[in-house]
Image (tube, rainbow, N blue to C red):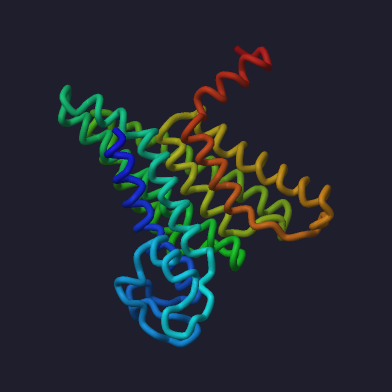
Amino acid sequence: MIVLLAFAAAFGIAIGSFLNVVAHRVPAGLSVVSPPSACPGCGSAITARDNVPVVSWLLLHARCRTCREPISARYPIVEAITGVVFVVVSLRFAPAFAEQLLLSPRLAAAAGLEWIVFLYLGAVSVALAAIDIDVRRLPDRIVLPSYVVGVALLGAVDLLRGDPTAVGTALAGSGAAALLFAVLWFARPGGMGLGDVKLAGVLGLFLGQLGVAQLAVGISAGFLLGGIFGVALLLSRRGGRRTAIPFGPWMLAGAWVGVLAGEPLAAAYLTVTGLT
């Protein structure tokens, strides 16, 4: 398991390097594959030895080798966060894959595919959070394809498990989450963006695949975390009631609370409130 987690971390860090490119170029409408990465200061192409995630930034002392222009700490931070995300996702989904590996190749394939699709969601979460923080946008170029990927791969997972109707729960979760956010968007113009509505549908799809408890906790946690952050801004006097706060990162963080701990949190809530 340690070897697997080390591989997940290394793979995540490598993906994080690409996500830096995505976060920079997608909002600008640029290709993420060409031209090759270059220093924004002098335009020098970044060589392979200077493009090793995290390590190159440390060895270069956070400066371009050619012009000595400072390199933002954001790059290794995004890479490291992605590595952590991939480890956490692997801790959540790899055990099910390992458990089925010797028992049922078909169910092992389903568990492995589910693991992969949530790694995809992890990568998308990092990219969208970075972009929303930067430019207050959740680009369709990332959000809309996630519907296709989610439906196709989660549908394949359910087919492998012999439960093709289960994808209906995921689609219902997507519709319910999107509808909730659409109502809020319509009721309070400017309170949230249309991008939040589209993202809600994606998160509802993935959360709905796991269950109603994960869906309810994941969506609720986003509002709770965003509200806590807003109150903290007010108390610290770093913002006011009209301060614009990107909600996408909190939606994504809340969704991952649902993915990782939705069932026990929902059970605890029902117990505390006496509803169970």
Please give the name of the residue rendered at 58% of the width and 47% of the height, measured from the top-left corner.
Answer: 251
151 horizontally vs 108: left or right: right
From this view, report whether residue 32 is shown above or below residue 19: below
From the top left corner, tell me how far across and down residue 161 is, in percent.
25, 29
Q: Is residue 69 left or right of residue 180?
A: left
Question: Is 28 situated left or right of 17 in this image?
Answer: right
Q: Position of residue 259 (x, y in %)?
A: 47, 35
- Of 191 and 136, nearer the camera is 136
Q: Residue furthest bottom?
A: 42
Q: Quadrant of the N terminus?
A: top left
Q: 183 or 16, which is in the foreground?
A: 16
Q: Residue at x 33, y 51 (%)?
A: 10
The answer to whether 173 is drawn above or below residue 73 in the figure is: above
Figure label count: 0
Looking at the image, which residue is at 29% across and 45% down?
Answer: 7
Position of residue 47 relative to residue 189, above or below, is: below
Residue 222, x across and y down, in percent = 61, 42
Residue found 60% across the figure and 61% down from its top: 133
Quadrant where the C terminus lies?
top right
Q: Residue 232: x and y, percent?
A: 76, 47
Q: Is residue 262 left or right of residue 106?
A: right
